Image (spheres, coloured by chain):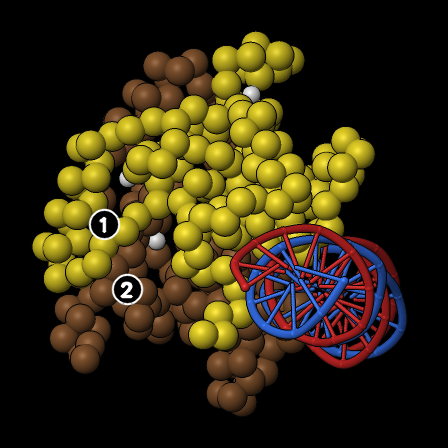
Chain colours: A yellow, B brown, C red, D blue
Amino acid sequence: MTSGTNSSAPSRKPTRQQAAVAELLERSDDFTSAQTVHARLREAGAGVGLATVYRTLQSMVDAGTVDVLRTDDGEAVYRACSTHHHHHLVCRSCGRTVEVEGPAVEKWADKVASEHGYTGVTHTLEIFGSCADCTAADA
Amino acid sequence: MTSGTNSSAPSRKPTRQQAAVAELLERSDDFTSAQTVHARLREAGAGVGLATVYRTLQSMVDAGTVDVLRTDDGEAVYRACSTHHHHHLVCRSCGRTVEVEGPAVEKWADKVASEHGYTGVTHTLEIFGSCADCTAADA
DNA sequence: TCTCAAACTGAAAATGATTGTCAAAACCGT
DNA sequence: ACGGTTTTGACAATCATTTTCAGTTTGAGA
Ligand SMILES: [Zn+2]
Ligand SMILES: [Zn+2]
Ligand SMILES: [Zn+2]
Ligand SMILES: [Zn+2]
């Protein structure tokens, strides 16, 4: 079984590097890019190789412990989220993020998709705005 | 006081290159990447420089005549859409796209955002699935 | 029609995030 | 400690997108 990567491994003990990435995300309230994670870890002393940061983030996404989305300029950003299905309300200025749920939206998406004969339906939904603090801080 | 976003001159006559890009998108039902647009135009004889393809697509997005979204691997894809606010039901296999509307979703997004004190709210919402044809064509 | 500056174009080089390589290091059961 | 497997990380390779910049086109005025 030459599974080049740890695809479906039964949760091995995390390495120092993997733990460092996970903890940094846990501590952060907003979405963070791989490059930023790498830089922060380096500043903090316990450096982790860039490739390892990418690998770790990707496996966390696969494991469902981290959410990923794309900024307007295409950069992938990651966040440790609850494991159940939800969406995000993200501040465009400071990145402060709130998890939100909308059962009605889920139903609507499935309904409109099946009405058009689409199967295996998934969806993406993000809300962007200026959080209260950032709105107040504006000129 | 017209819409503030368009700071350029009042719609100059499109160049041959701009027209070529626009027409190709009009003719296409699905979302297309800049690279693909460039390749298609080259095949069709009337080649257009890659940089110009990018510039033209960007200006069409700014003008609101083209929608853009990101594929899973971060590539930007473009589609000539109706100008009013809508969302997309996209086939993961063939790309066939249907424009859909959901007034209830719009209200919900604005409501949940303002409840959390967010202002200047926008949102993104896309639905993915396998269209009827692709579902049938599957083994 | 001629002139000139602004707008446009595109080949080539630069940018920058992400991925691939692969030898060395860490791990693990024996 | 020993062999096998997994992980790591410096570095090179990809690849979409942007920037450069010199040559081209356009259009309003003279
Ligand atoms: Zn904020
Ligand atoms: Zn949902
Ligand atoms: Zn659209
Ligand atoms: Zn909407």
Number of marks in the image?
Answer: 2
- Say which of A135 and A100 sits in front: A100
Q: Position of residue A129 (x, y in %)?
A: 47, 26
Disc number for residue A68: none
- Asked whether the viewer can see residue B84, the reply is no
The vertical placement of A73 against A30, above or below, is: below
Per the rendering, the mark at residue B100 is 1
Image quadrant holding the C terminus of chain B, namely bottom left
Q: Is residue B107 left or right of residue B73?
A: left
* Relative to B127, A22 lies left or right: right
Image quadrant of residue B12?
Answer: bottom right
Of the image marks 1 and 2, the number of the one nearer the N terminus: 2
Name the side, left or right, on which A46 lies relative to A68.
Answer: right
Residue in the image at 17% along x and 60% along y:
A119
**Relative horizontal placement of residue A42, taking residue B98 as reference (left or right):** right
Q: Quadrant of ligand 2?
A: top left
Residue B131 visible:
yes
Residue B69 in percent (x, y) is at 44, 54
Kind of residue sitting beneath label 2: Cys
Rendered residue at 66%/44% (across/down): A17
Residue B5: % across, % down:
54, 38
Classed neighbour count for the residue bearing mark 1: other residues with Cα under 10 Å, few (<14), some (14–19), many (≥20): some
CA distance separating discs 1 and 2: 13 Å
Q: How far across and how far down the image is residue B96, in percent?
A: 28, 67
* Residue located beneath label 2 in the image: B91
Seen as rendered, the residue at the extreme left is A115
**Residue at 37 percent of width and 22 percent of height:** B113
Judging depth in this view, the residue of A48 and B99 nearest the camera is A48
- Which chain letter matches label 2? B
- Say few, some or many: other residues with alpha carbon within 10 Å of mark 2 (under 14 / 14 to 19 / 20 or more): many
Q: Which amino acid, mark 1?
A: Val
Task: Determine whether label 1 and label 2 are within 8 Å by CB.
Answer: no
